[in-house]
Amino acid sequence: MFLGMRDVLAHRTIGDDYSVFKTLGITAMEVRIERDLTLQFLGEQHFSIADAESRERLLAHVTWRGVAIKGLLLCTKFDGSEDETRWVRESARFAHELGLESIRVDCGRPDPGDAAGRDRLRAELTPVFETLLDAAGEFGVKLALENHGQWTNQPEVMCALLDQFAARGLRLCLDTGNFYCTGQRPLREVYAAMARFGESVTTTHVKNASYPAEVRETKRDSEQFPYKNHSILIEQGDIDHAKVFRILKDAGYDGGWFYEDEALYRVPEGTDKAAAMRTTLAALKQDLASVEPAGVAVGA
């Protein structure tokens, strides 16, 4: 297993100074590809994966700076459009060239709120899932749907989707904070959900939250305890990431953990964000070392 960072986190915290990556000990990055096949968070230049020459230029840019692309992220909507299918297909082409197993995707649909409504939505989206999975499958690449938003952050929904589409190439991008930060389940059930889906995980995002001790093992009102007020630096939060790493390792996961600390966006003005990131990454490396005593890679 290895630690990496999302390009958007780097862009919004330490800017475009890639030398900071070296001081942080990070060489792996997950990059976000827009619907028009551009990348917007790698400095003042905007790169593209639209053709072989553009992809070569992109790879030269990151390689020269000592960083390797080890994850791709698409903010898909599962809208059934032809351009979304092209977006997934061309991203899968790039993933295949990079030797990546999967691409992180999003669904972004609101939760109907009851089992019957969730089943109807899944049936409605079945042709879209099939089309996008087939587009990625042309290059032997899987789609890792994140437990994100209202609908796909429901473990029962994710379980039903994986049951239906795993054979076609659907996998899970596990966000370690999302099952918890919505307040829909106690902390102990968050760990149980991670264990339940461990064998389906092909990529991850890492973040944390902290709530008053008396409500951690209860369902919480998200309006009373909004995540935006309770996101916290990863090493200070309620989720024990050494435990999370062990759960996923026991399930056979050996991929990347992409640092996505949204708490960095709201630290007090004047905070040395690079120093805060070094502290967090040191803690994550220690947690990973506790389950991989031979040492932790910072890129793979």
Image: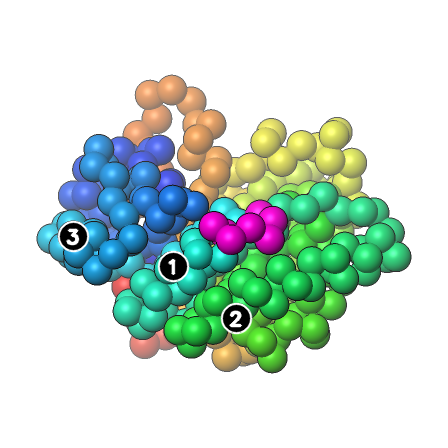
Q: Quick one: label 2 or label 3, which is nearer the N terminus?
A: 3
Amino acid at the residue labelled 3? Arg
Horizontal side of residue 157 vs 11, given as left or right: right
Amino acid at the residue labelled 1? Ser
Residue under the image location 33 percent in, 33 percent down: 13
Residue under the image location 29 percent in, 53 percent down: 50
Which label sits in the foreground, 1 or 2? 2
Residue under the image location 28 percent in, 69 percent down: 97
**What is the crowding at mark 2: few (fewer than 14 residues within 10 Å), some, or many (at least 20)?**
many
Q: Is residue 97 above or below residue 50?
A: below
- Which stretch appears magenta? 77-84
**What is the crowding at mark 1: few (fewer than 14 residues within 10 Å), some, or many (at least 20)?**
many
Residue lying farthest to the front in this orientation = 82
Which quadrant of the rendered structure holds the N terminus?
bottom left
Residue designated by label 3? 57
Q: Is residue 264 above or below residue 251?
A: above
Residue designated by label 1? 91
Whether residue 248 is visible here, answered yes or no, is no
Check the image and tell me how it is coloured.
rainbow
Q: Nearer the viewer, residue 13 or 219?
A: 13
Residue designated by label 2? 134
Mark 2 to mark 3: distance in Å? 28 Å
Indicate the quadrant where residue 140 lies: bottom left
Label 1 close to label 2 by CB (< 8 Å): no
Residue 151 appears at what percent x and percent y?
A: 71, 50
Whether residue 77 is visible here, answered yes or no, is yes
Label 1 close to label 3 by CB (< 8 Å): no
Q: Secondary structure at mark 3?
A: helix
